[in-house]
Amino acid sequence: MISIRNLSFQYNSKATIAFPDFTIPRGQHCLLLGESGSGKTTLLHLLGGLLRGYEGSVQVDNTELSTLSEKALDKFRGQHVGFIFQKNHLINAFTVEKNILLSPFLAGLNPDLERFNTILSSLGLAEKKQSPVSALSHGQAQRVAIARAVINHPSIIFADEPTSALDDSNCNRVIDLLLQVAKAQDTTLVVATHDQRLKDKIKNQIVLSSPLKR
Ligand SMILES: Nc1ncnc2c1ncn2[C@@H]1O[C@H](COP(=O)(O)OP(=O)(O)OP(=O)(O)O)[C@@H](O)[C@H]1O
C-alpha cells in the first residue's frame, strides 16, 4: 500500500511542488497524470525513495520513508520496489542475463534462477539470454528493463513514461505485459504518463495539478 499526506518537495531554491493526498491499496494499478512539469517524475522518485528531504508523509507498505537511514532505504528499495525508467538504464556491454541478475545482486538477494528463466520466457527473451544488450532492438531492451524491475518480486512497480516513445502495437505489448506481471504477483503498479492510449487500460487515475495553477 502507498499513502501520501500533505506531501511537498522543493528542489534547491525552486518553488515548492505540493501533491494531493491519496492512498493506493496493495495490488491496485494506477495512472499518474498531469501536464509537463506537474511533478510526476518527482512524485515517483519520492515514492520510490530516490529523492529524500520531503515535507509531509510518504508511507510505503506501512513504512514512513523518511524514518529510514540511507542504507535501510537502499535495502528497502531493492527488496520492495521495481523501477522502469523512460530511458532503460541498461548496461550495453553486459548480456541480458547479467543486466537482469544485477538487480538481486545489488539488493543483497540470492538470484532465483528458476524465476529468472520463467520471467525471460514469459517476456519472449529466452533466446537472448547471452546476447549483449547492445545487440537488442528497442522493444527487446525495454522488456529486459521490465524483467529487471520484476525479478526481485517487488510489491510495487513504478514506471515512468514506459510507452510514450512506442508505436501502437508496441505500446499495447508493453502495457499488457506490465499488467499481466503485476496481476500475477499482486503487485501495485503506478505508471506516470502523458500517453492518452493508457487511459483505457488503467482506470484508476491520480491527476497532478498544472504547475501554472498552483
Ligand atoms: N533535478 C532537478 N532540479 C531542479 N528542479 C527540478 C529537477 N527535476 C525536476 N525539477 C523541476 O520540478 C518540477 C517537476 O518536474 P518533474 O520532472 O517531476 O515533472 P513531470 O510532470 O514529470 O514532467 P514531464 O511530464 O515533462 O516529464 C519542474 O518544474 C522541474 O523543472
Image (cartoon, rainbow, N blue to C red):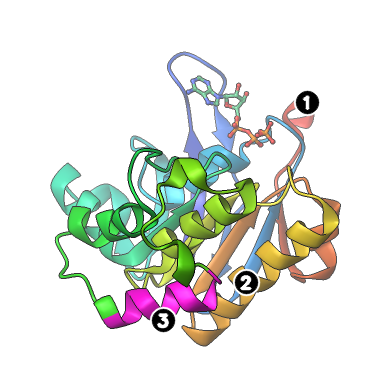
Judging by the rendered image, the residue that carries numbered circle 3 is 118
> What is the three-letter code of the residue carrying label 2?
Leu
Q: Is residue 76 left or right of residue 189?
A: left
Number of the label disc, if any, that sits on residue 212 = 1
Judging by the rendered image, the residue that carries numbered circle 2 is 177
Instruction: Report x, y in % for residue 148.
Output: 40, 59
Q: Is residue 1 visible?
A: no
User: Label 3, label 2: how many angstroms apart (C-alpha)?
Assistant: 14 Å
> What is the three-letter code of the residue carrying label 3?
Thr
Instruction: Report x, y in % for residue 71.
Output: 14, 47
Residue at 26% x, 76% y: name it: 113
Question: Mark 1 or mark 3, which has the lower sequence index?
Answer: 3
| Magenta highlight range | 114-124
Front residue (pair 123, 35): 123
Is residue 70 magenta-colored?
A: no
- Asked if the residue at label 1 sits under 8 Å from ligand 1, the reply is no
Front residue (pair 167, 136): 136
Front residue (pair 181, 16): 181
Q: Establish if 14 lies above or below 125.
A: above
Residue at 65% x, 47% y: name it: 161
Quadrant showing the C terminus = top right
